[in-house]
């Protein structure tokens, strides 16, 4: 593994200033997961570093860059729909640069499709190329017609990339990149590459900077944070890293995602119990309640092992809550398999559930499996799952009424005059308060609930 420091490109900055009479504007839109959002913040930082400004509308931009997701087919369709809509804008503004980056750009069939069917797309590069963006733009501004890079894995981590964060009180902090798990349904290892862990000292330095800047909630990111540390000289695992970060003094809380059940250890649970800064909430994607399907998915755990970890967490961390991901309609899923998933959901009693109908991804092993289940049957199962989870969540939310909790006030509520905040357990509460409280903690008495959204009263003046 090679570690590099980001280098400011004065030549690119000079070229941008020479080409444009006024500072050019960039429109950046990130699709998909939190890692993509974090990547988008770094893309914005790199562009600002060479003289670009940022705008909120494609119509106002000199550069439009879509940072893409490849996890589900719907995400890809959305990207192509958005790119297609730019054709007319390009005709009106011939100097407009249109680019696509991220996970979709690390698939050869996507690059080929862009080359053939979207001739007005000027720039394509993969997930590991954010630091090279100034050089790519320089080539384009110097007259190169199109720059569509072939997918490639880059075994390097670039530190100190400028970041233009979207919030001044909530921050994403990547601790590792890539994935080694190769779940049969998942394209991530193929587009993001193998696991690469950042050095503890670099993570700690960025973390300290965020705390010093007043950030109240810091979310550690990785495709599988529990694999953190493999290959590093320091001999540090994820629990050790959490302990290290939580020694930093300050008023903040820490979340992390995503946590693979096969690597979520009792040591991790003990760490959550021991560290006050860590949220007492665990996102633990199970994907299915059928041992047969878990084996077909290459998940490397079974339901018994998963529930044993849940039970241990409840013993060690009183009041801990859980959320999960579930795939409905994986190839070959039977009614018996689905019934096992419903049973698991009822047994665990998740506070939140993120559900998806299986999406075939070209290049994965699951894409080669027979999939005889009709779409209608899959959607019916999905509705049954949603109904089951809604009933559980409504009951658990109602149980919280009457308690006083500390929430991070994040923004405006759905009704005029209200604000919205998030509890340690990841639920939201709405309450009347002055907007000056946004970005700070508040003590809220929970007075009611509307489905899975809590209602409260601010106890502070």
Image: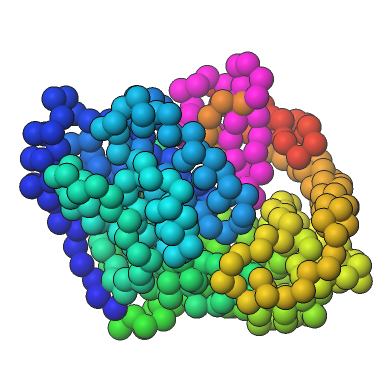
Q: Which residue is rendered at x = 25% and y = 42% of the image?
A: 47
Q: Position of residue 291 (x, y in %)?
A: 79, 79
Q: Is residue 156 magenta?
A: no
Q: In this orientation, which residue lies closer to the viewer: 289 or 248?
A: 289
Q: Could you say which quadrant of the image residue 375 lies in?
A: bottom right
Q: Which residues are magenta?
A: 414-442
Q: Does residue 415 belong to the magenta stretch?
A: yes
Instruction: Using the image as rendered, state which of residue 280 and residue 78 is in the foreground.
Output: 78
Residue at the location (71% across, 66% down)? 287
Answer left or right for 144 relative to 327: left
Q: Is residue 299 visible?
A: no
Q: Is residue 385 above or below residue 28?
A: below
From the image, which quarter does the N terminus lie in? Answer: bottom left
Q: Is residue 361 visible?
A: yes
Residue name at image x 35 percent, y 64 percent: 150
Q: Is residue 365 above or below residue 223?
A: below
Q: At which x and y percent is residue 441? A: 51, 37
């Amino acid at each position: 593994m090679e570690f590099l420091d980001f280098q400011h490109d004065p030549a690119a900055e000079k070229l941008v200033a020479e080409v444009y009479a006024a500072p050019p504007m960039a429109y950046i839109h990130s699709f998909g997961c939190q890692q993509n959002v974090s990547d988008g913040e770094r893309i914005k930082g790199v562009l600002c570093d060479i003289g670009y400004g940022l705008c909120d509308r494609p119509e106002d931009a000199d550069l439009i860059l879509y940072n893409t997701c490849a996890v589900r087919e719907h995400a890809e369709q959305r990207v192509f729909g958005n790119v297609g809509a730019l054709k007319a804008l390009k005709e009106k503004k011939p100097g407009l640069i249109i680019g696509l980056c991220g996970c979709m750009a690390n698939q050869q069939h996507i690059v080929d499709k862009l080359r053939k069917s979207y001739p007005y797309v000027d720039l394509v590069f993969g997930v590991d190329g954010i630091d090279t963006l100034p050089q790519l733009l320089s080539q384009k501004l110097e007259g190169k017609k199109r720059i569509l890079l072939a997918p490639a894995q880059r075994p390097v981590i670039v530190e100190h990339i400028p970041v233009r964060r979207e919030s001044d009180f909530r921050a994403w902090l990547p601790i590792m990149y890539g994935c080694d798990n190769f779940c049969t349904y998942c394209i991530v290892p193929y587009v993001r590459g193998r696991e690469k862990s950042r050095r503890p000292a670099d993570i700690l330095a960025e973390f300290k900077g965020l705390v010093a800047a007043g950030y109240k909630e810091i979310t550690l990111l990785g495709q599988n944070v529990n694999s953190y540390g493999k290959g590093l000289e320091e001999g540090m695992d994820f629990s050790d890293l959490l302990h290290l970060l939580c020694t930093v003094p300050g008023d903040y809380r820490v979340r992390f995602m995503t946590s693979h059940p096969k690597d979520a250890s009792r040591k991790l649970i003990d760490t959550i119990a021991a560290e006050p800064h860590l949220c007492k909430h665990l996102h633990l994607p199970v994907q299915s309640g059928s041992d047969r399907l878990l084996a077909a998915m290459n998940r490397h755990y079974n339901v018994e092992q998963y529930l044993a970890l849940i039970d241990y967490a409840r013993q060690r961390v009183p009041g801990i809550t859980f959320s999960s991901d579930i795939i409905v309609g994986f190839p070959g899923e039977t009614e018996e398999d689905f019934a096992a998933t419903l049973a698991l959901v009822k047994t665990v009693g998740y506070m939140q559930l993120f559900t998806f109908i299986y999406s075939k991804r070209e290049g994965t092993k699951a894409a080669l499996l027979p999939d005889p289940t009709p779409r209608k049957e899959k959607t019916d199962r999905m509705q049954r799952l949603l109904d089951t989870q809604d009933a559980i969540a409504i009951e658990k939310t109602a149980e919280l009424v009457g308690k006083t909790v500390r929430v991070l006030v994040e923004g405006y509520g759905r009704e005029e005059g209200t604000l919205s905040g998030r509890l340690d357990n990841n639920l939201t509460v709405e309450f009347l308060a002055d907007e000056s409280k946004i970005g700070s903690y508040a003590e809220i008495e929970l007075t009611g609930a509307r489905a899975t959204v809590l209602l409260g009263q601010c106890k502070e003046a």
